[in-house]
Image: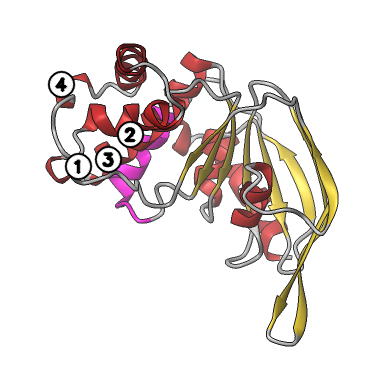
Amino acid sequence: MLKMQNIELVYCSGKKQVKALDNISVDVEKGEFLSIVGPSGCGKTTILKIIARLINPTKGKIIKPDDFEVGYVFQNSTLLKWRSIIDNIALPLEIKGIEKQEAYSKAEEAMNIVELEEFRDAYPKDLSGGMRHRAAIARALVYDPEILLMDEPFGALDEPTRLKLNVEINRIWIKTHRTVIFVTHNVGEAVFLSNRVAVLSKRPAHIKKIIKIDLPKQRTLEILDSEKYIKQVLKIRKIFSQ
């Protein structure tokens, strides 16, 4: 579905050239959940921006279909405070010029997927942090993207809320059959959510290893106490720290 081939990125910092990414290559299959972990500042978010065509790599290429649509969930929910939840979710379709009735019909569908229907006419200030992130996910899903890019969306949330949203993301992924690339600094979160986990080195980042995760497709919090889960977390942490 998507191939990153020999991606390199060099940028200027003052008079110096800094190499951020070094020969990043990975194939992402349709319907896969791939997490990317690595040290802070190593270029995880940069990879998402290259996939989303927000920046261009210095070398290498992304191979994907011409009509490829990308949904992007940022670290902050970035909801507009003066718009209701349904209005926020419908916003991308309004920007694309979709007729209002169709836009709001699709927004209702996306809102139902994240189970926020009872907060349809609420405003962001009325919602908890977790609910705002669910609304942001609905907004990213509303135009039916082939791939969903998620950039540490739960990093600022407390542990109970983050765990609850991890279960929700797993449910949404199974229901929508979306391809997801998820950036996180939390190895446990990456193992809980993913089919595979790509471990990046420090900058200039290269892929140290890609680990296939052996867990049931449907994830529950009980998995966190399982020997299989714990072993895979420890394996990735060891690679991470080498």
Q: Is residue 149 left or right of residue 122?
A: right
Residue 217 location in percent, x, y? 56, 20
* Mark 1: amino acid: Pro
- Label count reads 4
Quadrant holding the C terminus: bottom right
Question: Which mark is drawn over residue 134?
Answer: 2
* Viewer-nearest residue: 37 or 22: 22
Contact? badges 1 and 3 (CB < 8 Å)? yes
Q: Label 3: few (<14), some or many (≥20) within 10 Å?
A: many
The image quarter containing residue 108 is top left
* Mark 3: amino acid: Arg
Which residue lies under the disc numbered 3?
A: 132
- In this rendering, the answer to whether 177 lies above or below 2 is above
Q: Which residues are magenta?
A: 156-169
Element type at mark 2: helix
Question: Which mark is drawn over residue 221?
Answer: none
- For marks 3 and 4, the one nearer the N-term is 4
Element type at mark 1: helix
Which residue lies under the disc numbered 1?
A: 124
Contact? badges 1 and 2 (CB < 8 Å)? no
Contact? badges 2 and 4 (CB < 8 Å)? no
- For marks 1 and 4, the one nearer the N-term is 4
Rendered residue at 60%/67% (across/down):
41
Contact? badges 2 and 3 (CB < 8 Å)? yes
Rendered residue at 19%/34% (across/down):
84
Q: Main secondary structure of the magenta part?
A: helix
Mark 1 or 4, closer to the camera: 1
* Mark 4: amino acid: Glu
Which residue lies under the disc numbered 4?
A: 118
Alpha carbons under labels 2 and 4: distance apart: 13 Å
